Amino acid sequence: MKEKPTTSDLIIPREDPYYYSSKETISVLDKIYSISQRHPVNVLVAGRQGCGKSSLVKQYAAVYDKPLATFQVGILSEPGQLFGEYALEGGETKYKQFLFPQALQTPGCVIHLEEINRPENPKALNMLFSLLSDDRQVWMDELGTLNVADGVVFFATLNEGEDFIGTELLDPALRDRFYILLMDYLPNEVEREVLIKKTGISDEDADQIIESINTLRGNSELSMEVSTRTALMIGEMMAVGASLREAIVTSLQTDNETLESILLSLHIEKGYKEMGKSEYLLLTKEMLLKK
Amino acid sequence: MNPRIHANDNIIERFYIPGGDGYSAFWRRDKSPIEVLELSKVLVSLRKISSHIGRNVGTVVWSGMELKDGIALDPTPIMGKYPVPAFKTDIMVGRTIQLSYEKTEWSERYKQLSLSQLDLPDNYAYKFNLFFDMCEKVYTDLLANVSVLGNYTEKARLWEIKEKRKTFINPPTDIELYHLWWDMAADRKGLKYKEEYVDRSVGGLLERTNLEKFYKKPLRMLNSIVDRLRYECPRIAGVSERGSFRKELYLSIWPGILEQIRFWPTDRSDPFLLADKYQDDIEKDDKKKKAVKATLISYADTIEKTIRKKAADYTEKVRSNVKNVDDVVRIKGNDVIMRVKNKVDKKLLHNLQFILKSVAHRKTVYSRGLKSGKIDRRRLYRASTTGTVFNHKKDLFRMVNNIVLLLDATGSMAEPNKWNQSEILIQTLFTALVNYNPNARLFAYNEVKNICHLTELYMNGIFYTVLPHGQTASGEAIIATALKLKSTQKKPLLIHITDGASNWGCGVVDAIKFCAKRKINLLTLGVGCSPGAKDALKKEYGNLLQFLDKTDDLPHLLRKLLNYSKWN
């Protein structure tokens, strides 16, 4: 399915045919949509990295036929940075507007604020406060008054990771403005189905991946968090002919020593083994054609 | 397999590295082409393997290295080519598995019990030793065969049989009999021991040198116990019950075996039947082995240091910095550590980071020469040329002071709830600190066998723990920790977390003076203190002390301590 162009620079994303979510989450999203028909609404999606938060926002936009605009809050270091900046034009400094002002003035637009808890400076979010409050407008010297259009839905996502868990650490002034949606990894049966459908691997390979990531998730010594995203990366590697070992080695972001412990754990506990061959080949076009 | 040569321009298209095939190639990632580093890395890997077999295996070392309890492995099979090829690693892994099982199954203990029960004359005791050892080898290989580990023990077994075959003398000998049995009994398919022995060697085709006439009957006896070793013994719960079962099993066939082998030489070094007939050969082989081992012994220290830093002794240094020298207790570094779960309290961490940010130094980093952003006055001259007159500003926060946390891990902290709380506290505080100063360090001190041990609890992004134990020698621990601080940067910070006053060693008065002299801010945090302990701590530390009654108070107390240290 192709992405549908809209009248502006904003596009309606393609629907993911294999995006699964809990019944409760889907029901909540439906209610959010109903509320958005009355007035703009803000939703905070929290969960561990790689559990499908960003995909949920994208899928919401796709399912409800809304344009989507995504903004990285993590790179913001001062207020107003989302809206635009000065640049030279014909030898003169002019204010160059970014996509954000356009997105919030587009009716029904889904605005995704990624990693809302991680701006480089907490003050960088100050200009968002009034947009997310009942006012739904903000004044800027360069652009004048900006009003949030009807039907706009702000989705903010945040990672539960090393330095964050739950939503209680978000600035209360900001947190108060959001409905909260908590997400977690998919259950094994669903994760397996997603793996098969999205990567095209066989049932056996999917079982092998699920078994091995369960081993890693359950190993207190390694304290590894293997996300659904990582599982999909492993699956994609296997789909193009990589062995489980190759896929794990290339998909888990860790150092050699930990990787050795992980592989050893899978080797001994699960009995996975491959007799490796030590070979070095010439990498040239000619050699690739010979393969 | 030879590398193929390109016909046209003589370019080698393919290198096949012989010996690179092996089961260990599946998991071995941490390698080095440098001998000493590679030997260290292989050893670390072997330790991981042995830890999968059991907790009571002890330390795995290369023979020649210091060993109190554990396994000493002969490294000669893997020496010579680095990184060690997978097939050689497999052999060494197999050997480690065999020896680890012998440790966990108490083989040595049951051999001694059997020997004392039999009370054999020396020449038969020599024979029995060999018999028992081989029975246990068969047993450990059978244990390994039920899992992937059997692949490695098989390789080690076949390699050892091949090596031993070179030293066999004219048959019959005990050693040849046992190795034939080992090959049959531990075979992974589990079929060989069920069949009669057939000599398939070249010599076996001739009646005169056929081995069946010597070995068929004793092999039948030996094979009679394999089923019970294979199926019954592993199912017995309890290591001592399993040991007793095996001992009785071996002793049940020993008289029959002895009857057969009584007048055979045991092996080429049999001191009772061969005198010094093969002494020259043995000496020649020993010389070769010794030459290789000498290389390793010269590396022993380096390998130890590579694997972990050697425990340093700080006692003399502490003595030279206190008045009451006689009261100073021995203090050493310690590297016996256990990995611990990450117990960081996220909410507390968040609050601590706010506090630390307020005292951290801001460093502004500019990206200049951009096409958009904020106008950079210094680059306005470019407006008419490249137009890159903008910049982007980014603030970084860093604590310039060196920081060390020191945790009291003595007996008074051993109460599970208290220790758990302390670990949460220290891990959270340290995580917050390390964000603003990547060089921050974390230590704990406890007492083991009358020695105060100072242990580093955070290395390479991983938290470790020690068992809280013994008396509190805060003075020695503070001085030893302070000695680790470089005073090159701004006033270093030493944050000491304790639940009571020092009750051992030289006391903290000299330690406080020492820190003041070296311009180190010593701050003490009292955690879970009784009223009595609070009074005692106040007397010791004065204004450098804050008491933490609730974990949530930590950010506020830390601010107080940091502010105090700022102005004093």
Image (spheres, rainbow, N blue to C red):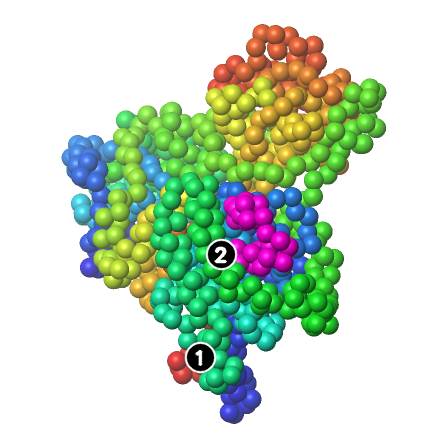
Residue B64 placement (x, y as % from top left): 69, 54
A11 left or right of B467 in image: left
Q: Disc 2: which chain?
A: B
Which residue shows up at 58% across the image and 66% down it? Answer: B263
What span is in magenta? B106-135
Mark 1 neighbour class, 10 Å CA radius: few under 14, some 14 to 19, many 20 or more: few
Mainly helix, strand or loop, the magenta region? helix
Q: Position of residue B318 (x, y in %)?
A: 78, 28
Observer-nearest of B220 and B78 = B220
Distance from the alpha carbon under mark 1 to that under mark 2 = 27 Å
A136 vs A195: above or below: above
Quick check: B260 above or below B418? Answer: below
Three-letter amino acid code at disc 2?
Trp
Q: State yes or no: residue B126 in magenta.
A: yes
Callout 1–callout 2 Cβ contact below 8 Å: no
Disc 2 is placed on an element classified as: helix
Element type at marker 1?
loop
Q: Is residue B83 left or right of residue B505?
A: left
Rendered image: mark on residue B254: 2
Residue reaching furthest to the bottom: B8
Residue B528 appears in the picture as rendered: yes
Sequence-wise first label, 1 or 2: 1
> Is A184 drawn above or below residue B558 in the view shown?
below
Q: Amino acid at mark 1?
A: Arg
Whether residue A274 appears in this view of the structure is: no
Quadrant in the picture for the C terminus of chain A: bottom left
Are dots 1 and 2 on a single chain? yes
User: What is the quadrant of residue B401 in the picture?
Assistant: top right
Quarter of the figure with the N terminus of chain A: bottom left
Badge 2, how many Cα within 10 Å: few under 14, some, many 20+? some
Question: What residue does disc 1 label?
Answer: B200
